[in-house]
Image: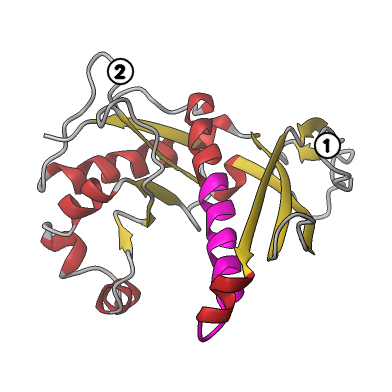
Amino acid sequence: GEIRGAGSSVKIHNLGAVTVSDYTKNTDLSAPETLTDAETILSIDQARSFNMQIDDIDQAQQVPKVMEGAMREAAYALANDLDDYLSELHTAAGITTGFGDNTTPIVPTSTTAYEYLADAYTALDEANCPPQGRWVIVPPWYHGLLRKDARFVSYGTDRNRAVLENGAIGEAAGFNVLVSNNVENTAGAKYKIMFGHPSAWTLAMQIEKVEAYRPPLRFADAVKGLNVYGAKVVRSGILGTMTASKA
C-alpha cells in the first residue's frame, strides 16, 4: 500500500515456512504444499513536524547563509526523533530470559560486556534466526566497555579492524554494533538493549511536506516539514532485549 498521510495503513504479507522432504529417484513428488499467508496491518500512527525561521537580519550577517545548515539540523532532528520512537519496540521482544529485567538487571563489565553479546547471539541461533545482518543497539557506556576488551578492538575480521581505525563501531560476537543515546532507560539505569535481525520488524515512513514560506508578520524565511511513519515487530521470536545497568 501507499502512505497517504497520518492515519493510513500499510499491509505486510508474511509467508509461512517451507517444508523440506526426502526425494527418491524416479518417484513422483508429493502434492505441492500450500503456503500459509498471514497479513499484518501496519498503522501509520506517528505524525511529527518542525517549523523554524531565520530572521532576515541574521541571514544578512551570516556568511555563508544559515538556512542550509538549519535544514541539516532539521534532518538530524527528524532522524533522532524516529530513533527514539523505535527504541520503544523493545516491549515486543520475544527473547528476554537470561538477559536481566527491571527487578534484576545485568551489570556488565569490561570483561562480561562482550560475553553477554555472545550469549545473545547464541539465543538467536536457538531461535533459528538467519545469521546475516544481525545487529545490536547499545548505549555509549556499553560501547565504552567493549572498547576495553581486546576481543573487540584487537582481533576479529579485517572489516572490524578497518572500521575501528576509521572511528566507526564495528562488529562484536557476530553482531553489527550500533550506538544510540536513545536506548530506553529508567533514570540512567535498566537500559533496554535490543538485538536481533532486520526481518524482526518493519518501518514505513514518508516525508509528507517540506514547505518554505515567509511569515506574514516577520521579515524572515521559514521552513516547515511533516514526517509520518509507523513501525511494527512482525517476528518477535528473533528480537531480543537485554536489560542492563551501569556498574
Q: For mark 2, what is the residue?
A: 102
Which quarter of the figure is the N terminus placed in?
top right
Within the image, what quadrant is residue 144 found in?
bottom left
Relative to 186, 41 lies left or right: right
The correct choice, above or below, for 146 with respect to 182 in the image is below
Type of amino acid at the residue the image marks with label 2: Asn
Q: CA distance from mark 1 to mark 2?
A: 40 Å
Residue situated in front as seen by the camera: 51 or 154:
51
Q: x and y percent of residue 145 in the render?
A: 16, 50
Residue 203 in the image: state x and y as whole percent: 67, 45
Q: Residue furthest top?
A: 103
Q: Residues within 10 Å of mark 1 (few under 14, many from 20)?
A: few
Q: Are marks 1 and 2 in contact (CB under 8 Å)?
A: no
In this rendering, position of residue 100 left or right of residue 13: left
Give the SS element for disc 1: loop
Where 42 sits versus 224, above or below?
above
Q: Position of residue 28 (x, y in %)?
A: 87, 47
- Is residue 65 in sight in this rendering? yes
Q: Residue at x 76, y 57 (%)?
A: 215
What is the span of residues highlighted in magenta in the rendered image? Answer: 62-82
Give whichever of 114, 5 is nearer the camera: 5
Q: As shown in the figure, which amino acid type bears the numbered disc 1?
A: Leu
Q: Secondary structure at mark 2?
A: loop
Which residue is painted at 58% across and 59% down in the image?
74
As drawn, the label of residue 21 is none
236 part of magenta stretch: no
| Main SS, magenta residues | helix
Reading the image, the residue beneath label 1 is: 35
The residue that appears at 42% across and 36% down in the rendered structure is: 126
Residue 127 visible to an observer of this rendering: no
